Image: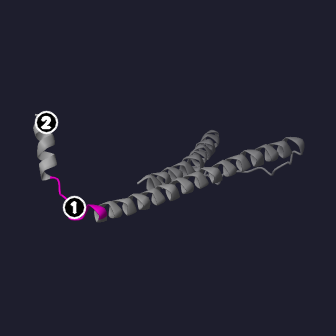
Amino acid sequence: MEDEIRTLLHETAPQPSDPAAFRLELNARLSAVEQIKTYRDREYRRSRRTMYFVFAAGILLGVVLTALALLHPVELPDISLPIPPEGLAGRYAGYVAMALGAITAACAIVLPLTLTRHRSRFLDS
């Protein structure tokens, strides 16, 4: 069965009219594919390098700001949420603020990762 399929494919394969022209065109297309692949790889390395620099800068900035906050504490004014008295009880306001903070932090983490993933999928196709 496999031999029959192989012979059928060999018999029905298109034959180029001029083998030299066919090889020249094939080599031109292969070199174009290699150029595209090289460009894609270069862009991928550049975007990864940029991501590493941004990550390192974020870590460094976080360490510096944490050190400044620990070494030079600043007294901040009281922050209160404008919650109507008939809405949530006073003890739930802290939980609402923590939930909103967690959602904001999750969005701040997930959004750049999602955008980076979308871009890498675009480069791969």
Image-based side of 87 in relation to 69, left or right: left
Q: Residues within 10 Å of mark 2 (few under 14, many from 20)?
A: few
Which residues lie in the magenta part? 13-20
Q: Could you tell me what secondary structure mostly forms the magenta stretch?
A: loop
Residue 11, horizontal then vertical, whole percent: 12, 49
Location of residue 69 with respect to 13 vertically, above or below: above
Depth check: give the residue in front, 97 or 5: 5
How many discs appear? 2
Residue 53, horizontal then vertical, whole percent: 69, 51
Instruction: Check disc 1 and report the residue beneath it.
Output: 16
Residue 74's tag is none
Image-based side of 45 in relation to 4, left or right: right
In whole angstroms, how far apart are the C-alphas of marks 2 and 1? 24 Å
Amino acid at pointer 1: Pro
Badge 2 or badge 1: first in the primary sequence: 2
Q: Magenta stretch: residue 33 in it?
A: no
Residue found at the far right of this picture: 72
Location of residue 6 with respect to 48 vertically, above or below: above
Image-based side of 59 in relation to 24, left or right: right
Instruction: Check disc 2 and report the residue beneath it.
Output: 3
Residue 49, horizontal then vertical, whole percent: 64, 51
Q: Which residue occupies 44% across, 52% down?
A: 124
Q: Which residue occupies 45% across, 56% down?
A: 34
Q: Is label 2 or label 1 in front?
A: 1
Quadrant in which the C terminus appears = bottom left
Depth check: give the residue in front, 50 or 80: 50
Residue 106, horizontal then vertical, whole percent: 57, 45
Amino acid at pointer 2: Asp
Q: Secondary structure at mark 2?
A: helix
